[in-house]
Image (spheres, rainbow, N blue to C red):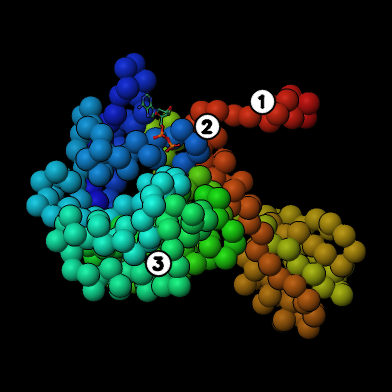
Amino acid sequence: MIEARGLTKRYGDKTAVKDLSFTVEPGIVTGFLGPNGAGKSTTMRMILGLDRPSSGSVTVNGRSYAEHAAPLHEVGALLEAKAIHTGRTAYNHLLALAATTGIPRRRVDEVIDLVGLREVARKRAGGFSLGMGQRLGIASALLGDPKTLILDEPVNGLDPEGILWIRNLLKGLAAEGRAVFVSSHLMSEMALTAEHLIVIGRGRLIADTSVTDFIERASTGRVKVRSPQAARLRDLLAGPDVTVSATEEGTLLVSGLTSDRIGQIASDNGVTLFELAPQQASLEEAFMELTGDSVEYRAPARTAERSAA
Ligand code: ADP
C-alpha cells in the first residue's frame, strides 16, 4: 500500500509535483496516468526515497522508504527501461543482487521461472532485447517478494506479445494481494490493465477513479440502433426529450433513451434489431478531454490542425 499526502516537489522555481494525495490499495493494479512531463517519474522517485519531497510525505506499507529495515522485501521497482550493461548472465546478475540483500539462491530460481527467463538465464544480460531486459528488471523487483510493486512505463517499446505478458503478470501479482502501481501515458493500455486510476497533469491530481467509472463517464449518452424497420422504430421512439438521427440506411443514432428502453420498445412492437450499442467516446479522447489544459508539451502539428479547423 502506498499513501501520498500533500506530496510536493520543486526543482528551483519549477514545481514538478504539487500537493498530491492518493492511496494505492493492495489487491489491485492502480494505473498512474498522465501526459509526458506530468510528474509521474518524480512521484515514483519520491515513493522510492530517490528524491526528497519539498513538502508533504509518502509512505509504503505504513512507513517512508528510508525507515524500512529491508526495503527490497517491502517494495520492488522497475524504473524506466534502460539497457543493462553487464557481462554477467541474467542468473548471476540476480544472484549478485540476492547475495547483497540476504535473499536465498532458490528465490533466484523462482523469479527466473516466474518471468519466463529460464532458457536465457545463462546468457549474458548485456545482449538482451528490450523485452528480455524488462523481464529481468521485473525479476529483480520481485526478488524480495515485496508486497508493493512500482513500475514506470513498463510496456514502453515492447511488442504486442511483451505488452500482453506484462499486463497479465501485473494482474496476477495484484490478485495475490500485492499493491501494484504502474505508470503510463496511454489510457487505452491502462483501461486493459488497471482497476483504479490516479490521473495527474502538470503535477496536480486530476482524477482518482475506478476504471469502470472513467469509462462510464466517457459515455456520450447516445445509442446506435440498426434495424431493417428503422423508419417504423424511429416513429415509435419519438418523444419530447428524444432525438433520433439517421446516419445511414437502416441505422439510427438515439439520445434521450437508454439501450434497455429502446430494446424494450422494439420488442413490444415486434421490431427486429440487428444492433443496439451505447456509444462511447474513445478512451484516449476522454483522457485528452480530462487532461486538456495540463499537457505540457503539445505537438505544434496539433495547434496547426486546430487553427485550420
Ligand atoms: P513524467 O514522468 O510524467 O513524464 P517527470 O516526473 O519526469 O514527468 O517530470 C515532471 C516535470 O519535472 C517535467 O517538467 C520535468 O522537466 C521536470 N523535472 C523532472 N526532473 C527534474 C530535475 N531533476 N530537474 C529539473 N526539472 C525536473
Which is in the foreground here, disc 3 or disc 1?
Answer: 3
For marks 3 and 2 on the same chain, the one whose residue lies earlier in the sequence? 3
For the residues labelled 3 and 1, say whether their Cβ atoms are less than 8 Å apart: no
Q: Residues within 10 Å of mark 2 (few under 14, many from 20)?
A: some
Which element type, helix, strand or loop, lies under badge 3? loop
- The reply, left or right, for residue 121 in relation to residue 243 is left
Question: Residue 304: where, in percent of width, then height?
Answer: 73, 25
Question: What residue lies at 40% left-to-right and 67% top-to-bottom?
Answer: 121
Circle 1: residue type: Pro
User: Which residue occupies the foreground of this view, 249 or 89?
Assistant: 89
Above or below: residue 301 compared with residue 229: above
Q: Disc 2 residue type?
A: Val
Residue 295: numbered disc: 2
Answer whether labels 2 and 1 touch (C-beta < 8 Å).
no
Residue 113 placement (x, y as % from top left): 37, 74
* Label placed on residue 122: 3
The residue type indicated by label 3 comes to Arg
Across and down, in percent, residue 301 comes to 70, 29
Q: Earlier in the sequence, mark 2 or mark 1?
A: 2
Mark 3 to mark 1: distance in Å? 47 Å
